[in-house]
Image: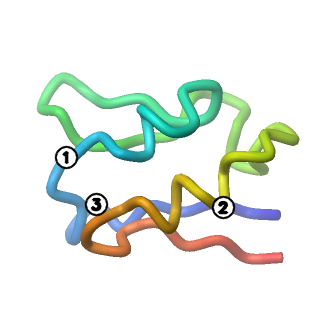
Amino acid sequence: MRISIDQDVCIGAGQCVLTSPGVFTQDDDGFSELLPGRADGGGDPLVREAARACPVQAITLEE
Protein backbone atom coordinates (compact mmCIF):
# COMPACT_ATOMS: atom_id res chain seq x y z
CA MET A 1 0.00 0.00 0.00
CA ARG A 2 1.11 3.54 -0.71
CA ILE A 3 -0.32 6.52 1.17
CA SER A 4 -0.33 10.05 -0.16
CA ILE A 5 -1.67 13.29 1.28
CA ASP A 6 -2.79 16.10 -1.02
CA GLN A 7 -1.35 19.12 0.76
CA ASP A 8 -3.43 21.46 -1.41
CA VAL A 9 -6.63 19.85 -0.07
CA CYS A 10 -5.65 19.17 3.57
CA ILE A 11 -7.27 21.56 6.07
CA GLY A 12 -5.41 20.25 9.12
CA ALA A 13 -8.44 18.72 10.85
CA GLY A 14 -6.14 16.09 12.38
CA GLN A 15 -8.58 13.19 12.16
CA CYS A 16 -5.91 11.02 10.52
CA VAL A 17 -3.51 11.66 13.42
CA LEU A 18 -6.18 10.86 15.99
CA THR A 19 -7.12 7.66 14.17
CA SER A 20 -3.68 6.39 13.20
CA PRO A 21 -0.95 8.20 15.20
CA GLY A 22 1.64 5.58 14.24
CA VAL A 23 1.45 6.67 10.59
CA PHE A 24 0.35 10.32 10.51
CA THR A 25 1.52 13.48 12.24
CA GLN A 26 0.98 17.21 11.76
CA ASP A 27 3.57 19.72 10.65
CA ASP A 28 4.24 23.04 12.38
CA ASP A 29 1.30 24.61 10.53
CA GLY A 30 -1.07 21.82 11.59
CA PHE A 31 -1.29 20.08 8.22
CA SER A 32 -1.06 16.31 7.98
CA GLU A 33 2.06 14.49 6.92
CA LEU A 34 3.36 10.96 7.09
CA LEU A 35 5.81 9.92 9.74
CA PRO A 36 9.23 9.03 8.27
CA GLY A 37 9.23 5.53 6.80
CA ARG A 38 5.44 5.17 6.99
CA ALA A 39 4.47 5.86 3.36
CA ASP A 40 3.41 2.21 3.15
CA GLY A 41 1.23 2.38 6.26
CA GLY A 42 3.62 0.35 8.35
CA GLY A 43 1.05 -2.42 8.68
CA ASP A 44 -1.26 -0.21 10.74
CA PRO A 45 -4.79 -1.63 10.46
CA LEU A 46 -6.33 1.81 11.06
CA VAL A 47 -4.85 3.50 7.97
CA ARG A 48 -8.01 2.89 5.92
CA GLU A 49 -10.15 4.29 8.71
CA ALA A 50 -7.88 7.34 8.92
CA ALA A 51 -8.36 7.97 5.19
CA ARG A 52 -12.14 7.66 5.60
CA ALA A 53 -12.07 10.01 8.60
CA CYS A 54 -10.51 12.83 6.58
CA PRO A 55 -13.31 15.41 6.14
CA VAL A 56 -11.92 16.62 2.79
CA GLN A 57 -10.62 13.28 1.43
CA ALA A 58 -7.03 14.54 1.23
CA ILE A 59 -5.62 11.04 1.85
CA THR A 60 -5.28 8.56 -1.00
CA LEU A 61 -4.47 4.88 -0.58
CA GLU A 62 -3.06 2.92 -3.50
CA GLU A 63 -2.77 -0.87 -3.37
Q: CA distance from mark 2 to mark 1?
A: 18 Å
The kind of residue on which mark 3 rests is Gln
Please say which color scheme the image uses: rainbow
Q: Is residue 59 left or right of residue 55?
A: right
- Depth check, mark 1 against mark 3: the one in front is 1
User: Of marks 2 and 1, which one's residue comes earlier in the chain?
Assistant: 1
The kind of residue on which mark 2 rests is Arg
Question: Residue 32: where, in percent of width, then height?
Answer: 34, 43
Q: Which residue is mark 3?
A: 7
- Residue at 29% across / 40% down in the picture? 14
Looking at the rendering, in which quadrant would you find the C terminus?
Answer: bottom right
Q: How many marks?
A: 3
Identify the secondary structure beneath mark 2: helix
Identify the secondary structure beneath mark 1: loop
- Depth check, mark 2 against mark 3: the one in front is 2
Picture quadrant of residue 56: bottom left
Q: Which residue is mark 2?
A: 48
Question: Up-down: is 9 above or below 36?
Answer: below
Question: Residue 58: where, in percent of width, then height?
Answer: 36, 69
Q: Which residue is mark 1?
A: 12
1 and 3 marks in contact (CB < 8 Å):
no
User: Of marks 1 and 3, which one's residue comes earlier in the chain?
Assistant: 3
Q: CA distance from mark 2 to mark 3?
A: 18 Å
Q: Is residue 6 left or right of residue 46?
A: left
User: Of marks 2 and 3, which one's residue comes earlier in the chain?
Assistant: 3
